[in-house]
Amino acid sequence: MKISVVAELCAGEGICEQDAPELFEIVDGVAVAKMEEVPKHLQEAARNACANGPTEAIKIEE
Ligand code: SF4
């Protein structure tokens, strides 16, 4: 699984960082993915962060 954030779509409120701090952090008001390739034990957290965000900024490639 690979993750990325489309900065232009990010609302910056940080739900992803709360859901999956190992994977996302807010930098200057925009979420960034801390890694591209997601290890197995963090994949559910990645899906949750993607589902819980208010926009479609998080992209997941299975
Ligand atoms: S949950 Fe989505 S919109 Fe909110 S900060 Fe994270 S990537 Fe941006």
Image: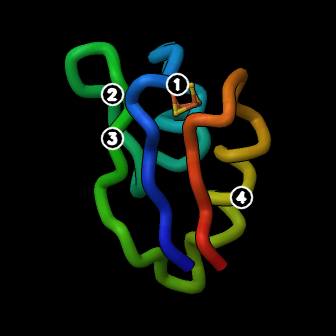
The amino acid pointed to by label 2 is: Ile
- Does any atom of ligand 1 lie closer than 8 Å to the CB of label 4? no
Circles 2, 4 touching at the beta carbon (< 8 Å): no
The residue under label 4 is 47
Residue at the front extreme, as displayed = 8
Q: Quadrant of the C terminus?
A: bottom right
Identify the residue position indicated by label 1 in the image.
Answer: 9
> Which element carries disc 1, helix, strand or loop?
helix
Mark 2 or mark 1: whose residue is earlier in sequence: 1
Mark 3 and mark 4 lie on one chain; the one further toward the N terminus is 3
Residue drawn at the location 57% of the way across and 36% of the way down: 57
1 or 3: tag closer to the N-terminus: 1
* Mark 4 residue type: Arg
Tell me what residue is drawn at x 47 percent, y 36 percent.
17
Closest to the observer: 42 or 56? 56
Per the model, the C-alpha gap separating discs 1 and 3 is 12 Å
Q: Which residue is mark 2?
A: 26
Residue 29 location (% of width, % of height) = 31, 14
Residue marked by disc 3: 32
Determine whether label 2 and label 3 are within 8 Å by CB. Answer: yes
Depth check, mark 2 against mark 1: the one in front is: 1
Q: Is mark 1 within 8 Å of ligand 1?
A: yes
| Callout 2: CB less than 8 Å from ligand 1 | yes
Q: CA distance from mark 3 to mark 4?
A: 15 Å
Task: Look at label 3 and name its amino acid.
Answer: Val
Query: As displayed, is residue 39 above or below residue 18?
Result: below
User: Farthest right residue?
Assistant: 51
Q: Going by the image, does 40 lie left or right of 34?
A: right
Assess whether mark 3 and mark 1 are in contact (beta carbons under 8 angstroms): no
Camera-nearest residue between 57 and 34? 57
